[in-house]
Amino acid sequence: MNILITSAGSELARNVAGTLAEDHTLRLTELYPVDGVEGTFVQSELGHDESTNELVRGIDTIIHVAEIPLGLLAEADQPNNYAIDYQTRCTYNLLMAASEEGVKHAIYASTLRLFEQHGEDWTVTESWRPRPSVDGFVLSKHLGEFTCREFGREGKLNVTCLRLGNLVTANAAATADPDSMWLEMNDAVSAFQGALESSSPWRIFHIQSEFPGSRFSIGKAKGHLKFDPQFAPSSQ
């Protein structure tokens, strides 16, 4: 399978690429030059022009990690507006080019923080309506979901939305205060692997590691994506 992975400079994209490289042909992209990636690298601003069409041409599936480099956010005059612009306009440009070039499937990385204003003792499933805060990251991901959903509903391409918990490595978790929304990095990668094989016009999955006190229901991901989280924090 030919796969495009965005946000190539992020830790998540690097881990996903490292796992998928053996069995797939990878193309990675980022807003700035990135060295040492698995596969071919193409720098792109995800603009509304031919370069974005060229970026996605020949691709079967896009994994849109959609993580903005912290350095670029720090340099922005209005970081929240910058984040919203990236998750909406740039995502729209990417998916529009994908639909024009015959890409079959896009996977969008959203966040379970859309529900952090709900009580922690509630078991939240994908059927619940998000309650996003005005935090720039959370609000931008919420709007990014809307952008993706319209492409799926209009039949332009199949879109899978993975709402991810708070990413952590097993080593970091061993010395950190427990977080009921933890998603261990290897578990996150396995969710993307499962999503590659599960394609429908529009589908949302909640993705977090499973341990005593974990906050979200992941039954749907277990069933449809064969998601089998392995993380077992020693602090729990």
Image (tube, rainbow, N blue to C red):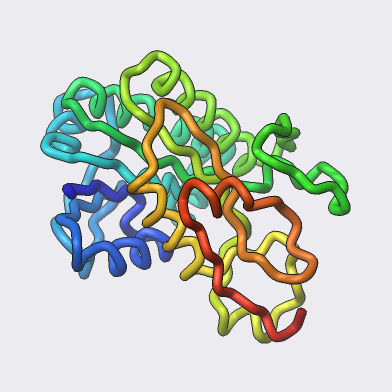
> Which of the pair 63/230 is nearer the observer?
230
User: What's the residue at 16%, 26% (across, down)?
Assistant: 101
Looking at the picture, does residue 104 appear above or below residue 224?
above
Residue 107 figure quarter: top left
Looking at the picture, does residue 213 appear above or below residue 129?
below
> Which of the pair 73/4 is nearer the observer?
4
Say whether residue 208 is left or right of residue 96.
right
Quarter containing the C terminus: bottom right
User: What's the residue at 50%, 66% (across, down)?
Assistant: 187
Q: Could you tell me residue 221's position as x and y percent?
A: 55, 49
> Which of the pair 148/68 is nearer the observer?
148
Q: Could you tell me residue 87's position as x and y percent?
A: 47, 34
Count of marks placed on residues: 0
Q: Could you tell me residue 12's position as x and y percent?
A: 42, 61
Q: Could you tell me residue 85's position as x and y percent?
A: 47, 30
Say whether residue 14 is left or right of residue 117.
left
User: What's the residue at 18%, 57% (across, down)?
Assistant: 24
* Farthest top residue in view: 154
Say whether residue 227 is left or right of residue 220.
left
Looking at the picture, does residue 62 appear above or below residue 170?
above
> Which of the pair 13/60 is nearer the observer?
60
Residue 118 figure quarter: top right
User: What's the residue at 38%, 25% (across, down)?
Assistant: 92
